[in-house]
Each structure stands twice: as structure tokens, then as C-alpha cells.
Image (tube, rainbow, N blue to C red):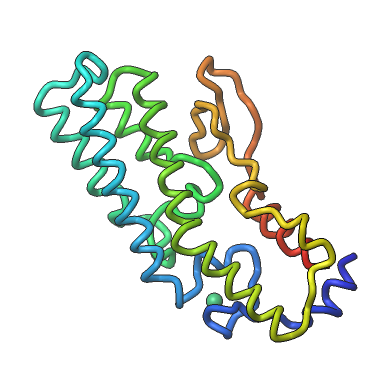
């Protein structure tokens, strides 16, 4: 299977920068996508802010005092601000974690120090990841897929089963149930360990490539 794939594609460069081979993590580091990643981060913060305001307007849901509210809003506002010790090569911090459906440990701890309700924490972290991933599909993934499709068309590559083509967001095993997926391990709301998420993103990219074999 692999040989056939290489026959067809040879040394495939990223369709966005045309410089680097498109391995699994390249979509994170691609120089042509840096601005787009910033847009993903800004949109996520903006949409999350609206949701936090909405949650705050629901009486007794978050139960925060004024100071906590300020802290919560600044937690969101500064979510993608770099602090020392983080991998500065990433266009925005935590991208590799959130893309794999993990919530960054330190951000989780901070949130927990502000919001006391476990359920509210879970709701916020789940929504945050969902918003981020939706923005990623909209701003980066769809554009990448369109470029790949266009490139294949010019190369005369036809998909074997075009009817079977499934959109990326449908094939990624994206956990939508409320789970606490903190960097490292995954637990459901009752504290049971669910599964170790790794290579989810690699798998999805791999599957997408397999469509073209
Ligand atoms: Zn690239």
C-alpha cells in the first residue's frame, strides 16, 4: 500500500509553502500558515469570551465574584500569550496539544483556581477545544484540502472512490462527550481514565492520504 502511495506522489511538498515535505506536524510549523494560526487563536479567544459572558449571565452557574470574573476573562484573553519555557517555534502556544484534543495542563490548573465548579470547568475546556478545532478546520484544513485537490487535478490523479470521500472533521475521532483531557491522560467526568490520546492527528492525516490510493 505504502509503495503505491509513493509511486503516485513521489516526493510530495506541502501545497502551501512548496518547500517542505508534508509530514504530520508540518501543518503546525508551515511558514505560510503562521498568520492563519494567529487568526485561529484570535477567533478562538473571541468566541470563547462570548461564551464566558453567556455563562456568567446565567445566574448561579459559575458563582464568581467580581475579582474572579476579571481573572477568568484575562485567563481567556491571555490564553495564547507565550510564557518562558514554551516551545517558541510554534506559531501559537499549545497548538500541538489542542489539535490532538488535549487541554494544556497549566491552563487547566489556572482555570481550576478561578472556577470552583468541576462541571463548569469541564464545560469551558470542552467548548474551548471545540471552538479551536472548528476554527482550524475553517481557516486552515479546508484550504489545505482544496489545494491538495487542485494539485491532484492538475496531475491527473483521480480518487479511486470519490463517493467515499469523507470530510476531515467527520473522520477524526474527535471526542465530543464531556471529558477532562488534560495533557498526558484522559479522564471522563467521573475520573475514570479513558484512553491515551496520541497520534490522533497523525492517524487522521494518514487516513486522508489513504483516500488517494
Ligand atoms: Zn508548508
- Residue at the image position 54 percent from the left and 62 percent from the top: 141
Can residue 212 be seen in this snapshot? yes
- 170 shown above or below 211: above
- 20 shown above or below 131: below
- Residue at the image position 41 percent from the left and 45 percent from the top: 131
Pick the residue in front: 139 or 21: 139
Q: Quadrant of residue 95?
A: bottom left
Give how far across and how far down residue 32 sits, in percent.
45, 77
Residue furthest toward the left?
66
Indicate which quadrant contains ligand 1: bottom right
- Residue at the image position 63 percent from the left and 78 percent from the top: 150
Pick the residue in front: 93 or 152: 152
- 119 shown above or below 100: above
Give how far across and how far down residue 89 sits, in percent.
43, 67
Q: Quadrant of residue 156?
A: bottom right
Horizontal relation, residue 52 to residue 17: left or right? left
Q: How many marks?
A: 0
- 186 shown above or below 168: above
User: Which quadrant would the N terminus be assigned to in this image?
Assistant: bottom right
- Residue at the image position 62 percent from the left and 54 percent from the top: 168
Residue furthest toward the front?
163
Give how far across and how far down residue 33 sits, in percent.
45, 71
Can residue 83 be seen in this snapshot? no
Give how far across and how far down residue 68 sits, in percent.
16, 27
User: Which quadrant would the C terminus be assigned to in this image?
Assistant: bottom right
Amino acid at each position: 500500500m505504502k509503495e503505491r502511495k509513493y509511486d503516485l506522489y513521489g516526493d510530495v511538498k506541502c501545497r502551501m509553502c512548496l518547500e517542505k515535505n508534508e509530514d504530520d506536524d508540518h501543518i503546525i510549523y508551515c511558514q505560510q500558515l503562521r498568520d492563519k494560526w494567529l487568526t485561529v487563536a484570535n477567533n478562538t479567544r473571541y468566541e470563547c469570551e462570548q461564551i464566558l459572558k453567556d455563562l456568567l449571565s446565567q445566574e448561579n452557574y459559575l458563582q464568581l465574584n467580581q475579582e474572579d470574573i476579571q481573572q477568568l476573562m484575562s485567563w481567556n484573553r491571555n490564553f495564547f500569550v507565550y510564557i518562558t519555557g514554551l516551545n517558541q517555534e510554534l506559531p501559537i502556544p499549545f497548538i500541538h496539544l489542542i489539535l490532538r484534543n488535549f487541554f494544556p495542563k497549566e491552563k487547566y490548573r489556572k482555570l481550576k483556581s478561578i472556577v470552583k465548579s468541576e462541571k463548569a470547568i469541564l464545560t469551558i475546556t470542552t467548548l474551548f477545544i471545540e471552538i479551536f478545532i472548528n476554527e482550524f478546520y475553517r481557516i486552515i484544513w479546508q484550504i489545505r484540502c482544496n489545494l491538495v485537490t487542485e494539485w491532484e487535478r492538475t496531475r491527473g490523479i483521480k480518487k479511486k472512490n470519490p463517493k467515499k470521500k469523507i470530510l476531515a472533521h467527520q473522520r477524526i475521532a474527535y471526542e465530543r462527550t464531556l471529558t477532562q483531557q488534560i495533557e498526558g491522560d484522559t479522564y471522563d467526568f467521573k475520573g475514570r481514565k479513558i484512553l491515551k490520546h496520541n497520534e490522533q492527528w497523525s492517524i487522521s492525516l494518514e487516513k486522508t492520504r489513504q483516500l488517494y490510493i
